[in-house]
């Protein structure tokens, strides 16, 4: 999978990102989740923290935030909720061969 993203991160910072494979799949999931974001327990996937960290380090794409939340119930500690804080437009999506 290859996806082209237009990322508006701030008043004048706009970037074009071409991502492939799981690096492209993860921001698509964040876009689909909307402003509320999601916790990986509700959208299972391998290595979420790695994909979000990679997205943060793409040029101009520091738009993904990790929010630490206390779980409901008897468990202690926190879990992550990933939220997209930038305007992201998916310009095109296609296979690797495209």
Image (tube, rainbow, N blue to C red):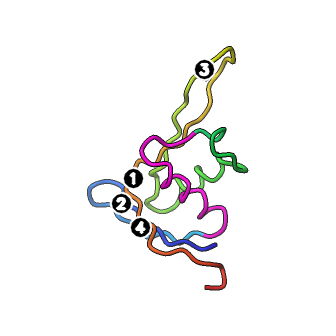
**Pointer 4 residue:** 6
Q: Is residue 73 left or right of residue 28?
A: right
Closest to the observer: 63 or 70? 70
User: Among all residues in the image, which is located at the extreme left?
Assistant: 11
1 or 3: mark nearer the eye: 3
**Pointer 2 residue:** 8
Marks 1 and 3 in Cβ contact (< 8 Å): no
Task: Tell me which label, 4 or 1, sits earlier in the chain.
Answer: 4
Percent coordinates x, y for residue 60 in the rendering: 43, 60
The residue located at (54%, 71%) in the rendering is 3
| Magenta highlight range | 20-38
Separation (CA) of disc 2 from disc 3: 34 Å
Percent coordinates x, y for residue 26 in the rendering: 59, 56
**Pointer 1 residue:** 86
Assign a secondary structure to mark 4: strand
Alpha-carbon neighbours of circle 1 within 10 Å: few (<14), some, or many (≥20)?
Answer: some
Quarter of the image that includes the N terminus = bottom right
Marks 2 and 1 in Cβ contact (< 8 Å): yes
**Pointer 3 residue:** 72
């Amino acid at each position: 999978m290859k996806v082209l993203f237009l990322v508006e991160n701030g008043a004048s910072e706009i970037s074009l990102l071409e991502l492939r494979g799981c690096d492209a799949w993860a921001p698509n999931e964040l876009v689909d989740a909307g402003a509320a974001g999601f916790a990986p327990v509700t959208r299972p996937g391998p290595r979420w923290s790695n994909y979000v960290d990679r997205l943060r380090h793409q040029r101009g794409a520091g738009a993904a935030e990790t929010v630490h939340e206390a779980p409901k119930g008897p468990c202690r500690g926190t879990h992550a909720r990933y939220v997209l804080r930038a305007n992201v437009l998916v310009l095109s999506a296609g296979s690797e061969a495209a």
